[in-house]
Image (cartoon, grey):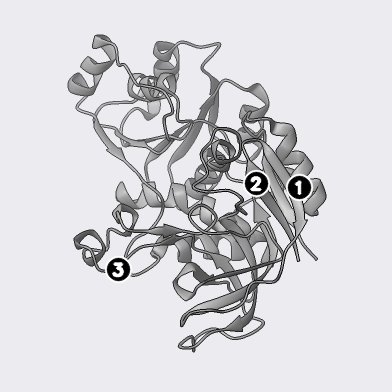
Amino acid sequence: MKSVVIHAEGSVRVEERPVPHLQAAGDVLVRVVCSGLCGSDIPRIFAHGAHYYPITLGHEFSGYVEACGEGVTDLHAGDAVACVPLLPCFSCPECEKGFYSLCKQYQFVGSRSDGGNAEYVVVNRANLFRLPAEMAIEDGAFIEPITVGLHAFKLAGGCEGKNVIIVGAGTIGLLAMQCALALGARSVTAVDINDDKLALAKSLGASQAFNSKDLSADEIAARLSENRFDQLVLETAGAPQTVSLAIDIAGPRARVALVGTLHHDLNLSSATFSKILRKELTLFGSWMNYSAPWPGDEWATAARLLSEKKLALKPLIAHVGNSESFAEAVQALNGSPMQGKILLRLP
């Protein structure tokens, strides 16, 4: 089978590898149809972020069950599935409370074990979510990134009737924005420094879109004045300046979800910190996308929204290609962020 393999920092190759075999009870062999590159994969490829080499990445994938190992009775050959990449231990105190995202003894498909950037992959049954029959198999590769925003919404008590502000109009942000609209948000605002992304956000239903390179935080806050109450702010860009911006533009008693992962130290000015107190803001972290019962209703909601055609995916895709084309597109990033989802499409 063809597999896209990372051999060392910045080395992306397509290789012929043997089809993996079922080895343990609970194993499932999946024929991969579609696999997406995640932003978290970029440091794994270009910044010594892989747990080992060589490794086949890919934790955002969908495909069909090819074969099931001992003990797997609820999936059968031909079933359409999407990857649920986390494999928690299910026995630690966090897992016993259903806080699966917080498990410290977890495994992870496409990071701590080989993933879906190959024609076939073997994963545990717990790592698979059955797709509805009415859903396009390719769309299943988007379920994992969709659930990132949905998990933040769940932690915030939902987004219905709220004024949702998305800081960072990348793939995660634009998917979260569309989910908020579909789930009954009163308004949705996108904030970014890229005019093309903001135009896309508007085309996908954003009530307002602001360029924070052109407008100060105070100016953005002023333009949000009519929707300053009942705010839910999602920071999805993962940069120190966007965290500060999210706090600065938030309205009174807003909830601010910190979703993006920082790779540089965060230093808040005393003025920004004062706003947390004076506006009585609630800041909370949102890590990954799992809840009880496993893997969580975030996954069922994502599948429902996709089945109901509530989310537009095509405008978020920058590249779709076979193994060679996918590897070339990934290599061409050279460590820079994606400007749209890069997808591997297998026959």
Q: CA distance from mark 3 to mark 2?
A: 30 Å
Say which of 39 and 53 sits in front. 53
Q: Earlier in the sequence, mark 3 or mark 2?
A: 2
Give the residue pinned by disc 3: 90
Can I make out residue 184 in this image? Answer: no
Q: Are marks 3 and 2 in contact (CB under 8 Å)?
A: no
Determine whether, in the image, residue 327 is placed left or right of residue 311.
Answer: right
Task: Look at label 3 and name its amino acid.
Answer: Phe
Residue at image location 76% in from the left, 47% down from the top? 326
Task: Evaluate whether residue 164 shows in this view.
Answer: yes
Q: Residues within 10 Å of mark 2 (few under 14, many from 20)?
A: many
The circle drawn on residue 148 is none
Q: Which mark is residue 6?
A: 2
Q: Residue at x 31, y 36 (%)?
A: 230
Q: Residues within 10 Å of mark 1 (few under 14, many from 20)?
A: many
Residue 271 % position (x, y): 26, 10
The secondary element bearing badge 1 is classed as: helix
The alpha-carbon separation of the residues under discs 1 and 2 comes to 13 Å
Question: At 68% across and 26% down in the image, what residue appears?
Answer: 196
Q: Position of residue 172 (x, y in %)?
A: 53, 42
What kind of residue is marked 1?
A: Phe
The C terminus lies in which quarter of the figure?
Answer: bottom right
Residue corresponding to mark 1: 326
Rendering quarter of residue 267: top left
Label 2 sits on a secondary structure element that is: strand
Q: Are marks 1 and 2 in contact (CB under 8 Å)?
A: no
How many other residues sit within 10 Å of disc 3, few (<14), some (14-19) or many (≥20)? some
Q: Image check: 37 left or right of 104?
A: right
Residue found at x 65% / y 50%: 312
